[in-house]
Image: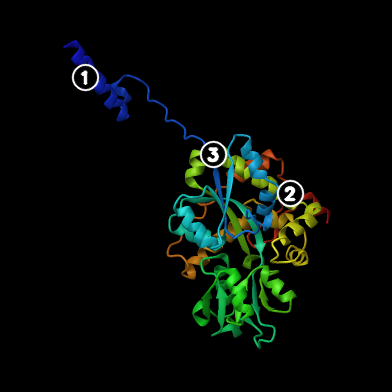
Amino acid sequence: MSSVRLTRRVVVAAIALAAGAPALLGAPRLAQARPARPKVVRFGVSQAGVGTPPRSTSGWTAVAQTRRYVEQALAQVGVPVEWIFFKGQGPAVNEAMSNDQLDFTTLGDLPSIIGRSVGIKAKLAAVTSKRGNHYVAVHPDAPLRTVADLRGKRIGLHKGTASQLAANRILEAHGLTERDVKIINLEPAASLAAFQTRDIDATFGTLSLLTLRDKGLARVLYTTRHQPVATGQGHVLVSERFSAEQPELAQRVVTALVSAAHYASLDANRQELLKLWASSGSATEATYDEEYRGALAPRMSPRFDPFAVARIQQGVADAYRFKLIRRSFDVGAWIEPRYVEAAVAQLKLDSLWPAYDAQGHLLTATPQAAAR
């Protein structure tokens, strides 16, 4: 009988533990085991990449990958990084994020906004590019003189990407909407090809359109240059699951990225950066030099200053107003600045990047900027 009673007590104790009822056993609650380190950190890049294996050739993310900042940081704890490139850009990245196939990713403003609006669990961990210019290109011999002249014309545009948000803003500023033109949904390379074969009348895009201009194949009809509030902005996102389960690894990754942003912000490295960016062949060093005219630091800052936050807020508001998303959301709960700020403090970079107000006016200058 005693053995039977003992067996029953063991069963009751096991059930109590499984049900999380330590009081029944008179023992303290067992601490929940921490998730094991992942076998690899999966880092998405919202572009096709160049070369084999593919590599990034834009902004400070190109520096991070080329100089292996992330690899070195993670090697200290025995975890490799896998760079995953997406020819389909933002829409393809969002699909991967929704299926929990990425831990970090780069992403433009509109696709990241779309992702958040449909419930993708990821937060903004850093700013990858600020004041990115957008351009509208038409054929050199086209009679078009203003954006308003695009009414009824065929326009190449990759929907769901940053270019679509920029296009809606530019069209609205000239009294038009997407319904007033014929949008042809094309990825950037396909759009450039269609433009050169004259299957479309105009295209919205970024730096590659200046290359067509320099070859005499296009005329820039409009640019957001000198209009800070009309420019674009990219980000690094971290999945909420990874951030919650692996905060130490997340900090290592972001600190490595901030180190890359530091390197890319130094004017002494300008020529090296221009050569790196131009290595993709989509634009020349001279074209990149034109695009990044002036000090590099304001464009390369990974921090969420008032200007960066305002651009995100305006992006969400505009996307909702243009019916590019069905519901708005709280931007404050989306931004996760703690990783970047911890990295800035650790690396003693607080005075490197100038801060700007919501309209793009200088708030605090770096010592170098003040000297100029």
Question: What residue is shown with label 3?
Answer: 247
Q: How is the image coloured?
A: rainbow
| Precedes in sequence: disc 1 or disc 3 | 1
Question: What residue is shown with label 2?
Answer: 263
Spot occupied by residue 212 in the image (x, y as percentages of width and height): 70, 74
Q: Quadrant of the N terminus?
A: top left
Where residue 8 is drawn, which disc sits there? 1
Q: Secondary structure at mark 2?
A: helix
Q: Is residue 242 visible?
A: yes
282 and 323: which is toward the camera? 282
Spot occupied by residue 91 in the image (x, y as percentages of width and height): 50, 62
Q: Is residue 95 left or right of residue 371?
A: left
Q: Is residue 329 visible?
A: no
Residue that appears at 76% across and 67% down: 290
| Precedes in sequence: disc 3 or disc 2 | 3
Q: Which of labels 1 and 2 is toward the front?
A: 1
Spot occupied by residue 112 in the image (x, y as percentages of width and height): 52, 58
Q: Please, what is the three-letter code of the amino acid marked with disc 2?
A: Tyr
Residue that appears at 23% across and 15% down: 6
2 and 85: which is toward the camera? 85
- How many marks on residues? 3
Q: Please, what is the three-letter code of the amino acid marked with disc 3?
A: Pro
| Precedes in sequence: disc 1 or disc 2 | 1
Spot occupied by residue 276 in the image (x, y as percentages of width and height): 73, 57
> Against 97, is 146 above or below?
below
Q: Is residue 100 left or right of residue 298?
A: left
Q: Secondary structure at mark 3?
A: helix
Q: Is residue 58 left or right of residue 39?
A: right
